[in-house]
Image (cartoon, rainbow, N blue to C red):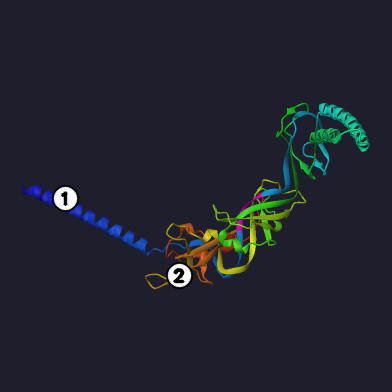
Amino acid sequence: MRQILYVLAAGVTFILILAGIKYWLVSNEIADQMAMKRPPETVTSLVVKEIEWPALIRATASLLPVQGVVLSAEQPGRLSKISAENGSNVVLGQAIMEFDTSVEEADLRATEAKGVRAKRTFERAKTLRASNATSQAELESAEADYRQAIAQADSLRASIAKKNISAPFAGKLGIREVNIGQYVIPGTALIPLYAADSLYAAFVVPQQLAASVKAGQEVTLTTDALPGAIFKGSVHAVNPNIDSTTRTLAVQALFSNSEGKLMPGMFASVEIGLAESTKIIPIPASAIQFAPYGDSVYVIESIKNPAGEEYRGVNPKIVKLGERRGEQVAVVSGLAPGAEIATSGVFKLQPGAAVATNNAFAPGNSQTPEVQDR
């Protein structure tokens, strides 16, 4: 029994010795790691400054032709001739399509013949009435027959004219919807015609900005369809009322399109510059950490470690953001001019982290960035 107790005591002692050695090793390793300094994170930085940012009204717009229409048939008939091809330019009054008018022309000849006879009867009745050889009623009946014949002839001429489709204004034809020999009914779409040497940009602004929009103001237009292209125009018309449903004001701007780059129906972005301006601090969007509880940036400043040693580190700062223009985001409050902030690599930072700056590949910070060809 005594031998067993000796063995157990020896085993417990051995285990305690091993545990003590392990604790000593782990403690030393933890102490070494705590004493070891993490290398600084490399970031790009920017010393921010306050600038005057001109006020802008921004909106999305749809481009509309100054004059545009889809020509349609006013009279039923069979298409007999196409005088202008798809996509061609036409001038005012130029013939585009003609419908068969043989029946109307025959009716017109018959009506004109009746008119000649009715005119002779009317003139004879006037002569007889002057000598009191006929009654006033017969004279009036002859005059009515004559004028009715004239009206019937005019009606047929108008019907024939409506079957000859001509350009109501100078412009460019689109793709026709009908072919020669096809019978069409009134209202059938024939071919679109647009005058696109000038275009309207139609957009709306909220009622809060309604008083700032006036005819004649310069408007800048850009569109994704033409990257890098900027078009200048002016406010052409402003609605005199606010829409009671959307509480917005409809605005129409006019743009020259002599080169034909813009097309009706395009989606575009427009900007109207205002006289007033606000003071803001512009920073690159890459410097911002967006979060539901508040957006923040990392400010680079001198920080002391527990040993009292100073180093370049970062601390987060909550900021209030304004609008975005190009690569810049406006900081309205929360950041002082002259502060240095990290502009890239912020995703790997944490409060108090040491940093080293290298601005060889600093992110863009322009209101009007240039489109880079790939």
Q: Name the main secondary structure of what is drawn in magenta.
A: strand
Q: Which residues are magenta?
A: 58-62
The residue furthest front is 132
Residue 219 sits inside the magenta stretch: no
In the image, residue 219 above or below residue 71: below
Residue 238 visible in image: yes
How many dots with numbers? 2
Which residue does the image show at 45% across and 62% down from the upper left? 39
Which residue lies under the disc numbered 1? 11
The amino acid type, in three-letter code, at marker 2 is Tyr
> Going by the image, does 204 lie left or right of 7?
right
Residue 311 quadrant = bottom left
Seen from the viewer's position, the closer of residues 61 and 94 is 94
> Is residue 60 found inside the magenta-colored segment of the image?
yes
Q: Which residue is mark 2?
A: 311
Residue 366 lies, in percent from the top left, at 62, 61
